[in-house]
Image (cartoon, helix red, strand yellow):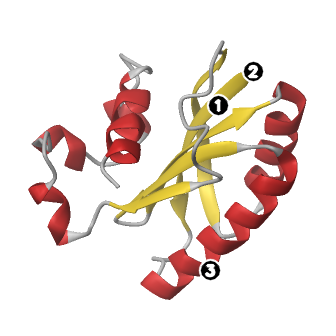
């Protein structure tokens, strides 16, 4: 089992309907390939974790890097794992611009940090903490 976490920037801001369409497509494709994960979006930036068999995850990531909807794809973390953390999600999703998120138990200002590499460079595993927090706050 393997997971890969990356960040990227949208070419143009995604509307709620754009995000929903992306989520529906991702869930369909990921379920077919046995991939689980979580996607966060804030202010035109994405953070995503993909989990599954390494070859399948790497192939999907290659497709993602070729997608013209975003740029600046940077891998934050890639490693072997013994158990998938997001196995209950074909693709979980949170829009961090949602005003209701600060009411979620355990929410801190860190949870609203920009989704860019500068916030996770010194501690790449912090991105997993952020993704995991939002996966548990359905």
Quadrant for residue 118, please give it. top left
Dot 2 corresponds to which residue? 1
Q: Closer to the observer: label 1 or label 2?
A: 2
- Seen in the picture, residue 18 relative to 84 is either above or below; the reply is below
- Seen in the picture, residue 24 relative to 122 is either above or below; the reply is below
Query: For this view, does 15 lie left or right of residue 102?
Result: right
Dot 1 corresponds to which residue? 4
Distance from disc 1 to disc 2, alpha carbons, whole Å, reads 11 Å
Report the front residue among 47 and 66: 47
Q: Closer to the observer: label 2 or label 3?
A: 2
- Tell me where residue 138 appears, x and y as whole percent: 35, 55
Q: Residue 42 carries which label?
A: none
* Residue at 41% from the left image edge and 23% from the top image edge: 121
- Seen in the picture, residue 112 relative to 101 is either above or below; the reply is above
- Tell me where residue 76 appears, x and y as whole percent: 54, 29
* Residue at 65% from the left image edge and 52% from the top image edge: 90
Which is more N-terminal, label 3 or label 2? Answer: 2
Q: What element carries label 3?
A: helix
């Amino acid at each position: 089992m393997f997971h890969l976490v990356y960040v990227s920037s949208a070419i143009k801001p995604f509307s709620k309907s754009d995000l929903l369409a992306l989520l529906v497509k991702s869930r369909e494709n990921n379920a077919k390939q046995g991939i689980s994960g979580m996607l966060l979006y804030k202010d035109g930036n994405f953070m995503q974790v993909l989990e599954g068999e390494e070859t399948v995850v790497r192939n999907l990531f290659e497709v993602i890097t070729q997608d013209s909807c975003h740029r600046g794809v940077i891998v934050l973390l890639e490693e072997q794992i013994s158990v998938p953390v997001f196995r209950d999600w074909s693709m979980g999703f949170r829009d961090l611009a949602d005003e209701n998120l600060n009411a979620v138990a355990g929410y801190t200002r860190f949870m609203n940090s920009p989704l860019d590499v500068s916030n996770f460079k010194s501690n790449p595993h912090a991105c997993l903490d952020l993704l995991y927090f939002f996966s548990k706050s359905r």
